[in-house]
Image (cartoon, rainbow, N blue to C red):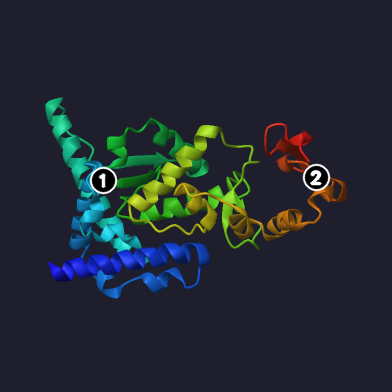
Amino acid sequence: LERVQGLHRLCEVLAWLFALNQTKELVPLSAFCNEAVSGLSSGELVHDFLSWTHSRATATDNKARFLLCNYPFLLSPQAKRRLLAALAQAEQEGAQQAAAHLALRQRQEGFMPFFLLTVRRQHLLQDALQQLSLADPLQLKKPLKVVFEGEPGVDEGGVRKEFFQLVTAQLAGPQFALLVPANDGGRTLWLNAANTWSEPGDWGLVGELLGLAVYNGVLLDLHLSPVLYRKLLGRELGLKDLQLLDPSLAAGLQQLLSYEPCEEVEEVFCRTFTAHRPVLGDELATVELVPGGADVP
C-alpha cells in the first residue's frame, strides 16, 4: 500500500511538471513516457482504462485511486495504440453479439456480423459518406468489410486498407480538396473551407470515416496539423497555434500587436477586424472576425 501511495504522489508531481511543460515546452513530450508503464500488457491497460471510465461515469473521485489513465503522458504512442486496438476489438465483439441477439429476438434467419461498405471505384467518397449517413451506431461498431462493386474477392484486410488509401488521397486531391496543405511549407494538412464540393454535414461524416479507419486498425497516411488535434481536444487556440499553420500571417499579427504607439495602427497598417477568404478560384470573400469588424480598426 505504501508503494502504491508513493507512486501516486510521484505521478502527481510528474503531472504538475507535465502541465508546466505544456506552457513552456522545456523538454519533448517523450521525456515523460515511462518504459515500464508502457510495457504493461494490453489486458492490464484495458483494465485500468475501464476502471478509469467507470469512476468518471459514477462521478467518483478518480484522483483518489491510483489509475494510470489519470496520467496518460506516461504511456508511449505505441502503448496507447495497443490500448485502442484492444478496446476496439472488445467493442467489435460486443457489437457482433448484440446484433446476433437482436436477430434472434426478431426471428431473423441470419445476421450480418460486419459493417459492409460497398463502393464504386469511380465514386468512392460519395458512396462511403452516403452509407455512413444511413448506418446506425450498432452497425458502425462491427468490424468493417469493404467491397468494390463488380469486383470479386473477400476482404481480409487488404481491400479495406486499399479503400482508405484511395479515400485519403481523394480528400486531399484536386477533385474534392477537403484538405489542403497548410501554409507551413506543406508539411501538414488543414481543412479547406473554400472547397465547393462539401455540404456542412459532410465534415462530420468525413470525421466518422477517418474514425472508422482508426477503429478498425488502419493506419492513415494523413498528416493533419497538430492544431486540428488541439481543437478536437477542446483546447483554447491562440497566436502560437497560428504559427504552426501560417507562420507569415502569425508574424504579421504579432507585428500589429507589438506596434507602438497603438493609436496609430489603423493609420499605419490600414487594417480592420476582417480577413479575406478564397471562395471560387481567385475570388475572395471578406469575413468579419468580430461582429461589425469592418468598422473596427
SS under mark 2:
loop
Q: Amino acid at mark 2?
A: Arg
Front-most of 39 and 283? 39
| Residue 266: percent from left, percent from top | 83, 45
Q: Which mark is residue 56?
A: 1
The residue sitting at 48% across, 45% down in the picture is 121
The residue sitting at 75% across, 37% down in the picture is 286
Front-most of 107 and 288? 288
Q: In this picture, is 125 found above or below 90?
A: above
| Residue 149: percent from left, percent from top | 41, 41
- The answer to which quarter of the image holds residue 134 is top left
Label 2 Cα neighbours within 10 Å, binned few <14 / some 14-19 / many ≥20: some
Identity of the residue furthest to the top in this view: 106
Q: Is residue 68 left or right of residue 241?
A: left
- The answer to which quarter of the image holds residue 271 is top right
| Residue 150: percent from left, percent from top | 41, 42
The residue under label 2 is 271
| Residue 86: percent from left, percent from top | 24, 56
Q: In this picture, is 9 found above or below 159?
A: below
